[in-house]
Image (cartoon, rainbow, N blue to C red):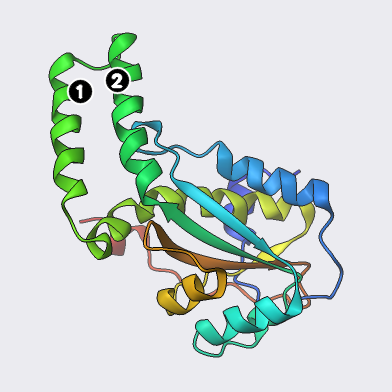
């Protein structure tokens, strides 16, 4: 099993996959890694659609502005934020923290007011706000995948409405990313990274 630092250093965006299927128990382990991710007030808004059939993968590739490698991956995860679950979870999660004394009552009231304000926002504004919670869970999957010799590639260049149309989803689901998964058929070299001095303000 890889250590965390090794996983971070060796992870690459994979765009060429072998056709070998991913075992069910491995997919379960990846989704379990997502399940354990942290989220604001423990709202856990992430939802995942596991796509394996060729026809749907082709549609997802089209919705990602015709990136054909997506359809070639054995599995594509459609990573979403459940807006309703997030708003409910923010309230219940904060109340749970209040009951055990982890946060003060005034913080609970602040969260209640914040959630009330968010409920009046357009979905287009709420989705991006909660997408970071889902992004943490997706990165858990991307790193855990290395334990099984799997590669992945974050896909954020997508037509969200097209993706939702494929599955008949309403606006309560905000599509955060696609994550093609499979055994790599390439070994990309590391790409140039900025120095620590360049990224610290």
Q: Disc 1, disc 2: CB below 8 Å?
A: yes
Would you call the spot at circle 1 few (<14 residues within 10 Å), some (14-19), or many (20 or more)? Answer: many
* Marks 1 and 2, the one that precedes in the sequence: 2
x and y, in percent, of residue 59 in the image: 61, 82
Near-viewer residue (175 or 166)? 166
x and y, in percent, of residue 17 in the image: 76, 76
Q: In the picture shown, does residue 5 fall above or below 75?
A: above
Residue that label 2 marks: 95
Q: Is residue 120 visible?
A: yes
Near-viewer residue (171 or 4)? 171
Residue displayed at 17% across by 55% down: 121
x and y, in percent, of residue 65 in the image: 49, 88
**Which quadrant, please, contains the N terminus?**
top right
Residue that label 1 marks: 108
Instruction: Name the image quarter holding residue 34.
Output: top right
Q: Horizontal placement of 83 versus 185: left or right?
A: left
Residue displayed at 37% across by 64% down: 195
Q: Horizontal placement of 176 versus 151: left or right?
A: left
Q: Is residue 15 visible?
A: no
Q: Horizontal placement of 41 versus 180: left or right?
A: left
Near-viewer residue (194 or 147)? 147
Q: In the picture shown, does residue 7 fall above or below 125?
A: above
Residue displayed at 41% across by 76% down: 161
């Amino acid at each position: 099993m890889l250590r965390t630092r090794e996983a971070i250093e060796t992870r690459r965006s994979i765009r060429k996959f072998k056709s070998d299927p991913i075992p069910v128990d491995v997919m379960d382990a990846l989704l379990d890694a997502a399940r354990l991710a942290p989220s604001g007030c423990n709202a856990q808004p992430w939802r995942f659609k596991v796509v394996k059939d060729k026809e749907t993968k082709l549609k997802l590739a089209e919705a990602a502005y015709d990136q054909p490698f997506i359809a070639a991956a054995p599995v594509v995860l459609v990573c979403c934020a459940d807006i309703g679950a997030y708003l409910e979870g923010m309230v219940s999660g904060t109340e749970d923290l209040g009951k055990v004394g982890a946060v003060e009552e005034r913080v609970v009231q602040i969260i209640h007011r914040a959630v009330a304000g968010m409920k009046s926002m357009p979905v287009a504004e709420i989705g991006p706000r909660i997408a970071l919670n889902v992004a943490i869970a997706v990165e858990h999957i991307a790193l855990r995948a290395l334990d099984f010799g799997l590669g992945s590639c974050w896909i954020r260049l997508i037509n969200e409405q097209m993706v939702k149309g494929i599955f008949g989803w309403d606006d309560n689901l905000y599509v955060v990313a696609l994550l093609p998964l499979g055994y790599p058929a390439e070994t990309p070299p590391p790409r140039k990274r900025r120095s620590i001095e360049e990224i610290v303000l």
